[in-house]
Image (cartoon, rainbow, N blue to C red):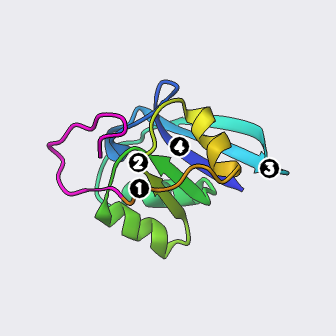
Amino acid sequence: MKIAVACDGTQVSQHFGHCEGFTIYTIENKQIAGKEFFQNPGHRPGFLPVFLHEKGANVVISGGMGGGAIDLFNEKGIEVVVGACGDCEVNVKNYIDGSLKSTESVCHQHQHAHECGNH
């Protein structure tokens, strides 16, 4: 399994499309077996879901994400978890153990700022 986290440094990005990049964690036997960072190749409609699908992502974790991106991920069979905040690796471990749940928070506009936990 591969889990992609939209991140700014070591923190979960609160805006998926405008994150610094994506850390993709490889999970084996419910443990993090490896990780790789990819710079955000640019925010344009429909591109990032294809990009992460091509990287093998099965799950995407972010703070906030637009409904169009969520729909595209769902069409590709990729689970989306939104409403996450804090350290990327902690969120991945919480997902693995079943304690990270999506808030179903959908961003409806691009002129917004999220505060951690306030979606």
Q: Main secondary structure of the magenta part?
A: loop
- Marks 1 and 3 sit apart, C-alpha to C-alpha, by 23 Å
Among numbered discs 4 and 1, the one appearing first in the sequence: 4
- Total marks shown come to 4
- Marks 2 and 4 sit apart, C-alpha to C-alpha, by 12 Å
Q: Mark 4 sits on what residue? A: 5
- Marks 4 and 1 sit apart, C-alpha to C-alpha, by 16 Å
| Residue 40 to residue 47: above or below | above
Q: Mark 1 sits on what residue? A: 103
Query: Start and end of the magenta stretch?
Result: 105-119
Q: Amino acid at mark 3?
A: Lys
Q: Residue furthest top?
A: 9
Are the residues at dot 2 and dot 1 in contact (C-beta closer than 8 Å)?
yes
On residue 30, which mark appears? 3
Among numbered discs 3 and 2, the one appearing first in the sequence: 3
Residue 61: x %, y % from top left: 50, 49
Among numbered discs 2 and 4, the one appearing first in the sequence: 4
Residue 67: x %, y % from top left: 30, 64
Q: Mark 2 sits on what residue? A: 83
| Residue 77 to residue 37: above or below | below
Q: Residue furthest left?
A: 111
- The residue under the point 42% across, 53% down is 48
